[in-house]
Image: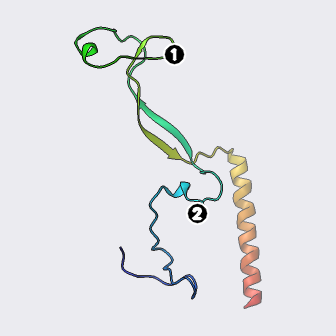
Amino acid sequence: MYIGLGWDEDRETKRKHYRQFYEDELELIKEIFPKPSPFNSEKIIRGQSRGISKGGLMGMFKSQKQDDSGQVSTIQTVGFFKGIIEIESKTDRKEYSEKKEKLIQELLRYLDKLS
């Protein structure tokens, strides 16, 4: 299925680091995401649930769906939106960035000392 490019992760697996094929969505594979999916998932819907007439020419040929209130509905799910939504304040983000930069500088200092 692919040309074996790249390098092996280790000598035992003989598996190239970026050439693995998965049949299913990645967030459903326990090997990659041991915890439930990190993505927020929302249905994308299309249609109308209020103000639709019950009769008409098209009403004769297909069954009419009704919503919880008993009114005719044409709402249907046409897809899903998946993403990660993060909400944070500017001050929290600034503090996080400063702390991260400080840790990176400290790590670089230790690496210099080690080498």
Instruction: Quickly name the residue at label 2.
Output: 32
In the rendered view, tell whether residue 6 sits above or below residue 104.
below
Residue 28 lies in quadrant: bottom right
Separation (CA) of disc 1 from disc 2: 39 Å
Q: What element carries label 2?
A: loop
Q: Residue at x 25, y 13 (%)?
A: 60
If the image is split into quadrants, where does the N terminus sit? bottom left
Q: Residue at x 51, y 58 (%)?
A: 26
Answer with left or right where residue 26 lies relative to residue 97.
left
In the rendered view, tell whether residue 42 sits above or below residue 25.
above
Q: Residue 44's mark?
A: none
Q: How crowded is mark 1: few (under 14 residues within 10 Å), some or many (20 or more)?
A: few
Answer with left or right where residue 37 lies relative to residue 55.
right
Total numbered badges shown on the rendered structure? 2
Q: Do the residues labelled 1 and 2 touch (CB within 8 Å)?
A: no
Q: 96 or 81, which is in the foreground?
A: 81
Q: 44 or 109, which is in the foreground?
A: 44
Answer with left or right where residue 19 lies relative to residue 102.
left
Seen from this angle, which residue lies furthest bottom? Answer: 115
Residue 82 is situated, as x and y percent measured from the top left of the image, at 50, 46
In the rendered view, tell whether residue 68 sits above or below residue 93.
above
Q: Is mark 1 on a helix, strand or loop?
A: loop
